[in-house]
Image (cartoon, rainbow, N blue to C red):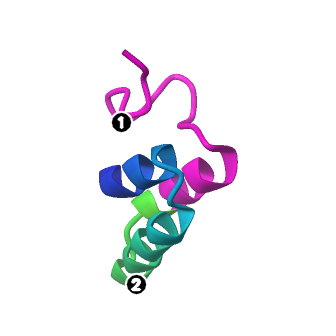
Amino acid sequence: MYRGVLYVQMGDKKRALEDHQTLVEMGSPLAVELEYVVKNNREKAPEQFFGVSEKL
């Protein structure tokens, strides 16, 4: 999940979607969260994953 978010931040949605597919195959509920990030280029507010997307 976290790596997928970082891929989105880096502009590499292809790799983020590969991580999303892995989460889907694992049956992880985090697949839904990563899908949101890929589609919206941000985490849900408030950030649920310790501000992975927060800018310093």
* Image height of 12 relative to 24, above or below: above
Q: Say which label, 2 or 1, has the lower sequence index.
A: 2
Q: Answer left or right for 25 relative to 12.
A: left
Circle number at residue 26: none
Q: Estimate the x, y position of residue 15 in percent, counting from the top left.
A: 44, 69
Amino acid type of disc 1? Phe
| Closer-to-camera residue (34/12) | 12
| Residue at left offset 37%, top offset 68% | 28
**Secondary structure character of the magenta stretch overall:** loop
- Circle 2 packing at 10 Å, graded few (<14), some (14-19), many (20+), is few
Q: Estimate the x, y position of residue 2 in percent, counting from the top left.
A: 32, 50
Q: Which residues are magenta?
A: 32-56
* Image height of 6 relative to 49, above or below: below
Amino acid type of disc 2? Glu
Residue indicated by mark 1: 49
Residue indicated by mark 2: 25
Q: Answer left or right for 48 relative to 39.
A: left
| Residue at left offset 50%, top offset 60% | 12
Magenta span has 47?
A: yes
Q: Estimate the x, y position of residue 18 in percent, counting from the top left.
A: 45, 76
Magenta span has 51?
A: yes
| Residue at left offset 59%, top offset 55% | 38
